[in-house]
Amino acid sequence: MKASQLFALAACSGVLGSILPQTALASCGTAFCTVNSNWTSESAITEGGSLLDLRYEYVSQNQPRAGTDDVAVGQIRKHHDEVKTVNRNLLLTYSHTFDAQWGISVTAPVVDRNHFHIHNHRGAQVPERWDFTELGDVRVVGRYQLPDTGTPLHPRAAGMTFGLKLPTGKTTVANENGDVAEPSLQPGSGTTDAIIGAYYHQKLPQSGASWFVQAQYQHALNSHDNFKPGGQLSADAGYRHSVTDRLGALIQLNFLVKRRDSGSAAEPADSGARYVSLSPGLSYALSDAVQVYGFLQKPVYRNVNGVQLTADKALVVGVSGRF
């Protein structure tokens, strides 16, 4: 496949977007970026073989928010006044397509997280920090694609994704003082989550463009140590235009709704949110089989329950290739 053909397909980066890691939006501000960037699995729709994608995310959450308003640290007093969480996530995804209909992807995230909050304890303000790098929860997702119903001038694809998020990440990470981090801050949730999604993609060869829509729902099937993360629904729409045979301009609109966490170890009052983000990006083909990409995600709407840390931007860069 030529680079121009590969990147015409790449606009539907969300086709297997359900292999992306969970987006945790709890009061402490742990997070993954919601941009769809699964470039290599996009070409897996029409070709057999294997693909590998390596993606880096940077999300610095240093703005406390209540509802739709920014607030100062400690303005609304809580047991913990959240100050800052910096997330540096590295995600490795392996995808294999068996035939025109069936495929599978496995994603393993490595979470580098630095968190700082103030513990209000009996009138004293005690600063507490956690800084760790750990394996997160691995996701295994299958894909079934419906028979092609498009035309040569308007080829299109539609299908569904289904799989599990597995409890591979630690849930007992502690700081240097031996204090175990709250469940929503941990690299793993301790739960097995069901994942189901659907996608639609269409190429517009005459205009050198393509577009996609994709939706996904994730729901925890159990609780762990009296904690159950809230279910989340995401929806994405994206458009790509070829600038040259190798360079593509991209834009995405990302929606996310997350329900409150539950359980005696959870913080239901300060979890759950509604987000809408705009994500412009670029892609560049280094060869017929290897491409690099980058996105800058900016929130356009944020409505959180209680008080939670939020970020005013997120950065995603990655490289993917077929072998």
Image (tube, rainbow, N blue to C red):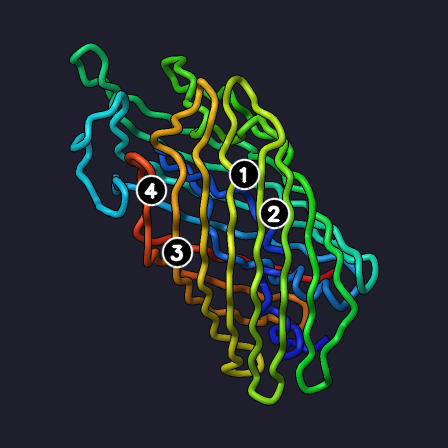
**Quadrant of the drawing holding the N terminus:** bottom right
Mark on residue 304? 4
Write down the residue under mark 1: 110
Q: Which mark is residue 276?
A: 3
| Residue on which the image places disc 2 | 92
Question: Alpha carbon of mark 4 to alpha carbon of mark 3: how far?
Answer: 12 Å
Mark 1 → mark 3, Cα distance in angstroms: 25 Å
Report how far apart the C-alphas of labels 1 and 2 lie in the structure. 8 Å
The numbered mark, 3 or 2, whose residue comes first in the sequence reads 2
Disc 1 or disc 4, which is closer to the eye?
4
Q: Which residue is at 50% across, 32% downward? A: 229
- Identity, as a three-letter code, of the amino acid under mark 2: Leu
Q: Is residue 60 left or right of residue 39?
A: left
In this orientation, which residue lies closer to the viewer: 33 or 93? 33
State if disc 2 and disc 1 touch (CB < 8 Å). yes
Do residues under tags 1 and 4 come within 8 Å of each other at their CB atoms?
no
Comes first in the chain, label 1 or label 2 = 2
Residue 286: which quarter of the image? bottom right
Dot in front, 3 or 2: 3
